[in-house]
Image: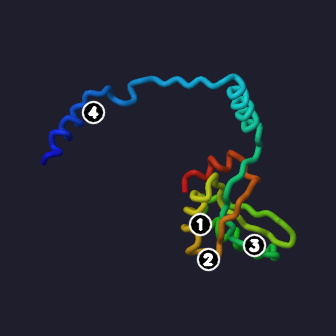
């Protein structure tokens, strides 16, 4: 009870302060910093490929098995983009394109019921358009 007056005084003083967010803050960068940030933005705009994550469903040396699994996958998950690549001696079937590992884990969780043993792979050959088109999982 003896702290009650101090608490009331504290609350009144807090309520009398101006509301947060009503002030404008302007940050001005030094000229070299502004030039560096502009250059950084320019370089990133010119990049055609970005790093990201995919879900690898299969790695096999058998091309016919790859085609069978791909067709089955497309039938079960028609809205999930899937593609394969050949890195001798394996054909690798991969689904989705995500900018973060957490986003890819969501698709992996959905798919592992039908495809046990799948795993996430980092891919540096993803186009920004692929990232945008896979946002709905």
Residue 43 in the image, given as x and y percentages of width and height: 76, 36
* Residue at the disc numbered 1: 108
Residue at the image point whose x is 62% and y is 74% from the top: 115
Q: Which of marks 4 and 3 is in front?
A: 4
Q: Earlier in the sequence, mark 2 or mark 4?
A: 4
Q: Earlier in the sequence, mark 2 or mark 1?
A: 1
Are there few (<14), some (14-19), or many (20+) residues within 10 Å of tag 3? many
* Residue at the disc numbered 4: 14
Q: Which mark is residue 116?
A: 2
Report the Cα–Cα distance between label 1 and label 3.
16 Å
* Residue at the disc numbered 3: 59
SS for tag 4? helix
Report the Cα–Cα distance between label 4 and label 3.
62 Å
SS for tag 2? loop
Q: Which of marks 1 and 3 is nearer the N terminus?
A: 3
* Side (left or right) of 95 relative to 136: right
């Amino acid at each position: 009870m003896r702290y009650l007056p101090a608490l009331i005084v504290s609350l009144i003083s807090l309520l009398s302060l101006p509301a947060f967010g009503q002030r404008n803050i302007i940050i001005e960068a030094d000229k070299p910093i502004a030039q560096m940030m502009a250059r950084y933005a320019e370089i990133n705009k010119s990049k055609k490929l970005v790093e990201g994550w995919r879900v690898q469903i299969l790695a096999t040396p058998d091309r016919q098995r790859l085609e069978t699994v791909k067709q089955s996958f497309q039938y079960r998950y028609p809205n999930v983009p899937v593609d394969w690549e050949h890195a001798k001696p394996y054909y690798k079937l991969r689904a989705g394109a995500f900018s973060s590992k957490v986003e890819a884990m969501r698709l992996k969780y959905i798919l592992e019921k039908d495809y046990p043993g799948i795993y996430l792979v980092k891919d540096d050959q993803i186009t920004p358009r692929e990232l945008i088109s896979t946002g709905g999982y």
